[in-house]
Amino acid sequence: MDIYLPIANLSVNALVIILLGGAVGMLSGMFGVGGGFLTTPLLIFYGIPPTVAAASASTQVTGASVSGVFAHMKRGGVDFQMGAVLVVGGMFGTAAGAAIFEILEALGQIDTVINILYVVMLGSIGGLMAKESLGSVLAVRAGKPRPAAKRRHHPLVASLPMRWRFYRSGLYISPLAPLILGFVTGIMTMLLGVGGGFIMVPAMLYLLGMGAQVVVGTSLFQILFVTMASTMMHSLTTKAVDIVLAVFLLIGSVTGAQIGARLAQRMRPDYLRLLLAAIVLLVALRMALGLGWRPDEIYTVQAL
Amino acid sequence: MKWIVALAMMFLPLSLSAQAVPKLVPDVSQRQINIQSGFTGAELLLFGAIIYPRGVAPEGQVDVAIVLRGPARPITLREKQKIAGIWINADSSDFRSVPVYYAIASSRPLRNIVDSKTAAIYELGLDNLQLSPSGEVDAKEQRRFSNGLVDLKQRNGLFLQEAGSVEITDQVLYRARLKIPSSVPVGTYVAETLLIRNGRVIVADDNVEVRVRKTGFEQLVTILAQDYSLFYGAMAVLVSLLLGWFAGYIFQRL
């Protein structure tokens, strides 16, 4: 079944897009991540122009995270105060991201920068996750109790001025720390079409030291609003949001997410994290190799 | 008086040949190509008749070339090079007029029917496109960029050159098929038919136009995205929110 994407200006197989969304959705349901970090590269491999891929993937993440936010809100798993600070940072981040995008596009380096960012980010996060989950899997195997996670914010965060109380997160820290975190993920959202959950969750846990019960909900809350902002920003600047592409991705991903969530209940969390780490590292490896391989097209056309 | 005779003698063959110029009656299977949801490309049939003076076809072979050309646009062409182990855009060149689409069909290979000068004048063939490179780049480098551009566009199906694809029946009727890929840009395309004999273009006709446009939903989406981007962005967000919320609601019931 072929459909024409009016903004990407090419026709694609709708089934491939739905399946792609479904596979990513399944992972996001299993691991509680938005999955944007897989959607964008997969779309690019499939032949969608990188800008359209990143813009439309962020639109898709909005839809993929909305029901998660509701679910976490019901359980009281969203720290709205923290979320609001993160969102404000995220808004500034998308604006800064848009400016960076424009500069890089004019220089002709946007694709390379997107690729390198992916490799660095996925490589480091995947590596950390693999190390951590492997450690706990091995500890469980050896019959030793898991080392208790210490919950304390980073000394750097503690040194920032102007502390606020974040009751739900159980924190007394400067709002500058989440503001900066939100800002950085906002840039990522704009450039890479990712929600940024897989950066934000570890950062909230290990840098801010937030309580685990509000981490995922609050990160989803921030992702929801920042991807909305980034869709608006892309619509206004790059004009690369393909709503047809986003809708087909969503049809796949919302279905996949439900299947993934059910699968996840039958699996041990440590193994689940190890699996996610392996997938993340695999994508990073593929992209790293892609940088060094001779590309199919040496030449690219940019309209003036 | 002698010079008048001489002048008359000079113009006589010209006026005679002006009378003897055949006329082309070209047409195309579709005057309009509509891009809509199921669009996977199109195939155009370009055909027509050659009307000879007094209805007599001349001795010897005639050849026909048909050019279909989209609007020209200025572009920047970037070239990747391997630097420090990774491929990045390292060099670029500007072209002021690159047709978004260019296809040429001819009854025989072009080099067999026209000399290089004629080919250059009428821009026949992918090697003869006047892409108007701008900026001061040396000729060799320019050649490399033009070749790269033509090669890229050829593999995208947006530039094509097909020798022998024009069929001529009884030296009067001709027809050719040209493929248009799904990634074809919108605009007004011009089809030019050239009648060629003894290496010279006898008559050329470029009165056939083909409009490529998006219609219906695809047109609406494009217009909204381009001209009403704030509204379009809000719509995209809303659609995404509703779809996500609705799916969550449905699956909760299941």
Image (cartoon, grey):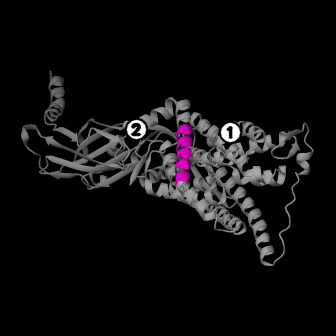
Circle 2 residues within 10 Å: few <14, some 14–19, many ≥20: few
Q: Is residue B201 left or right of residue A54?
A: left
The chain that hosts pointer 2 is B
Residue found at the very far front of the displayed protein: B253
Region of the chain picked out in magenta, as a range: B236-254
Gap between marks 1 and 2, in whole Å?
29 Å
Helix, strand or loop at disc 2?
helix
Identify which residue is drawn at 54% across, 32% down.
B229
Residue B251 sits inside the magenta stretch? yes
Circle 1 residues within 10 Å: few <14, some 14–19, many ≥20: many
Q: Amino acid at mark 1?
A: Thr
Helix, strand or loop at disc 1?
helix
The residue labelled by disc 2 is: B217
Q: Which percent across, then down, holds residue A81?
A: 78, 38
Identify which residue is drawn at 79% across, 52% down.
A203
**Label number found at residue A94:** 1
Report the front residue among B17 and B26: B26
Q: Amino acid at mark 2?
A: Phe
Q: Is residue B94 visible?
A: no
